[in-house]
């Protein structure tokens, strides 16, 4: 039977893991209104999204290494103090450059939660138990992706776009208090007992993680899934706006995606009890690819219907839900335990950097069109599947496979 401390731990790390995603998604329905307010182009306001992803990448690279060297709690507290302050300042930004600057700092603070939550799980549990925990956490995190745009749509409609950032500031402050109360220094991983310069030790740790082909294979799967969702998130509001939908209506369109993601997580949790990691990944990619093919066909035939995007994207997201918890647990536990924070940080940085690149490109290439967006997403799916084949399926394993540990 699980103790109360176990459930407190799950609640706290779930909030830590979800806050950056919540901060990314809550203002998406407000993007068209914000472009009007700042008198800028679609691609200019989308830069606030791209910069946020870059900030997450920077944060996770630094936070992962620092948490391995100095302990998890200290890094988490500093990160969420910065996140709360930056969120508050975003709400009162007077110009687009000012907003973008505070969004960068907001992401650097919030990214700490993403990387340390993964590392905290890897600190305490083996690979099989980690998959179970990630499969429990990720549906809740996925639910935040559903709640955030809906809440953001109504906050924008009734109070204006600034209310989204004030809401996030309150959320960040609540997490900060929860960390103080529920994560003691003893409950978090102690700083790794290594002698030497922390910077050079961190670089050495990154070198070890990057040379681990098993880690890279699973990390690239996560990158592909994250890029698909992020490019859809930043471009679809302009597609729906062009089709005549208001901000509060757009928020509801994300509900189907989050429900599909949660369903995929729950299926992953069930399948992992009976199958190997690679078997679950094959199922996940089958659903992932099928959804992409349907999206291309549906948007070609019904370019002006929102459901031509929403329904197949829900199928893509279900495949994503199958892939994410399994690949995340496999990637973080593919390295030594004292490099878990470094591995989690590098994995998060990889997915954010790749998503920043694709989300910056999607506005220029798709320009609010549903069919170009489906082609763009299909291309990312193809890249992800190719990486899976090259690094997981056909690459000889020189290290112990995770699937050997999970029957």
Image (cartoon, rainbow, N blue to C red):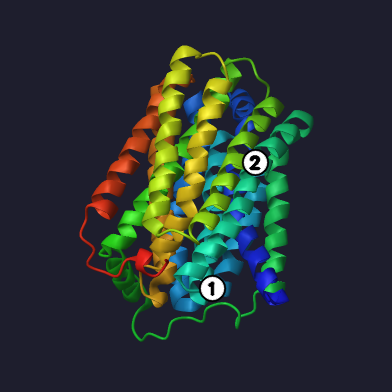
x, y (%) of residue 72?
Answer: 53, 73
Nearer to the camera, 244 or 46: 244
Q: Give the x, y percent position of residue 76.
A: 58, 67
Q: Gap between marks 1 and 2, in whole Å? A: 29 Å
Mark 1 residue element: helix
Residue at the image position 47 percent from the left and 27 percent from the top: 43
* Residue at x 63%, y 37% (from the top left corner): 27
Taking the spot 50% from the left edge, 55% from the top edge, the residue there is 271
Q: How many neighbours does mark 2 have within 10 angstroms: few (below 14), some (14-19), or many (20 or more)?
A: many
Q: Where does the C terminus fall, quadrant-wise?
A: bottom left
Q: Secondary structure at mark 2?
A: helix
| Quadrant of residue 73 within the rendered picture | bottom right
Residue 198, compared with residue 308, is above or below; it is below
Q: Which residue is mark 1?
A: 72
Up-down relation of residue 97 to residue 85 (above or below): above
Residue at 40%, 60% (x, y): give it: 276
Residue 144 on image: x %, y %: 65, 47
The quarter of the image holding the N terminus is bottom right
Q: Position of residue 393 (x, y in %)?
A: 27, 52
Asked whether the viewer can see residue 109, the reply is no
In the depicted structure, whether residue 196 falls above or below residue 43: below
* Nearer-the-camera pick, 33 or 211: 211
Outermost residue, right side: 158
Q: Is residue 174 left or right of residue 26?
A: right
Residue 68 appears in the rendering: yes
Q: Residue furthest front?
A: 274
Assess disc 1: are there few (<14), some (14-19) or many (≥20) residues with their C-alpha within 10 Å of its C-alpha.
many
Q: In the visual, does 116 lie left or right of 26? A: left
Badge 2 is on which residue?
Answer: 146
Sequence-earlier tag: 1 or 2: 1
Between disc 1 and disc 2, the foreground one is: 2
């Amino acid at each position: 039977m699980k103790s109360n401390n176990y459930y407190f731990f799950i609640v706290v790390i779930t909030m830590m893991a979800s806050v950056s995603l919540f901060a990314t998604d809550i203002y998406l329905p407000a993007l068209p209104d914000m472009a009007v307010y700042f008198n800028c182009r679609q691609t200019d306001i989308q830069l606030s999204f791209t910069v946020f992803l870059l900030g997450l990448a920077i944060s996770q690279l630094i936070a992962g290494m620092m948490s391995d060297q100095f302990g998890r709690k200290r890094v988490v507290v500093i990160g969420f103090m910065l996140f709360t302050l930056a969120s508050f300042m975003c709400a009162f930004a007077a110009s687009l450059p000012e907003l973008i600057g505070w969004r960068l700092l907001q992401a650097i603070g919030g990214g700490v939660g993403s990387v340390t939550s993964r590392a905290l799980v890897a600190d305490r549990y083996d690979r099989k138990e980690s998959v179970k925990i990630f499969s429990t956490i990720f549906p809740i995190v996925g639910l935040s992706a559903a709640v955030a745009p809906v809440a953001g749509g109504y906050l924008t409609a009734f109070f204006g776009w600034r209310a989204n950032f004030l809401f996030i500031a309150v959320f960040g402050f609540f997490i900060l208090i929860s960390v103080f109360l529920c994560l003691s220094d003893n409950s978090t991983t102690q700083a790794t007992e290594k002698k030497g310069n922390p910077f050079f030790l961190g670089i050495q740790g990154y070198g070890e993680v990057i040379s681990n082909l098993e880690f890279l294979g699973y990390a690239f799967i996560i990158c592909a899934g994250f890029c698909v969702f992020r490019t859809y998130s930043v471009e679809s509001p302009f597609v729906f706006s062009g089709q005549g939908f208001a901000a509060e209506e757009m928020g509801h369109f994300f509900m189907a995606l989050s429900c599909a993601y949660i369903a995929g997580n729950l299926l992953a949790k069930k399948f992992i009890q009976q199958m190997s990691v690679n078997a679950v990944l094959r199922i996940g990619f089958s659903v992932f690819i099928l959804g992409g093919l349907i999206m291309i066909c549906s948007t070609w035939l019904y370019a002006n219907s929102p459901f031509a995007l929403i329904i197949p994207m829900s199928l893509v997201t279900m495949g994503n839900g199958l892939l994410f918890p399994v690949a995340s647990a496999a990637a973080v536990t593919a390295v030594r335990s004292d490099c878990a924070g470094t591995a989690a940080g590098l994995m998060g940085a990889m997915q954010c950097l790749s998503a920043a690149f694709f989300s910056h490109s999607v506005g220029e290439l798709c320009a609010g069109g549903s069919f170009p967006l489906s082609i763009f997403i299909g291309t990312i799916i193809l890249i992800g599947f190719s990486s899976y084949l090259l690094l997981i399926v056909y690459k000889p394993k020189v290290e112990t496979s995770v699937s050997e540990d999970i029957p």
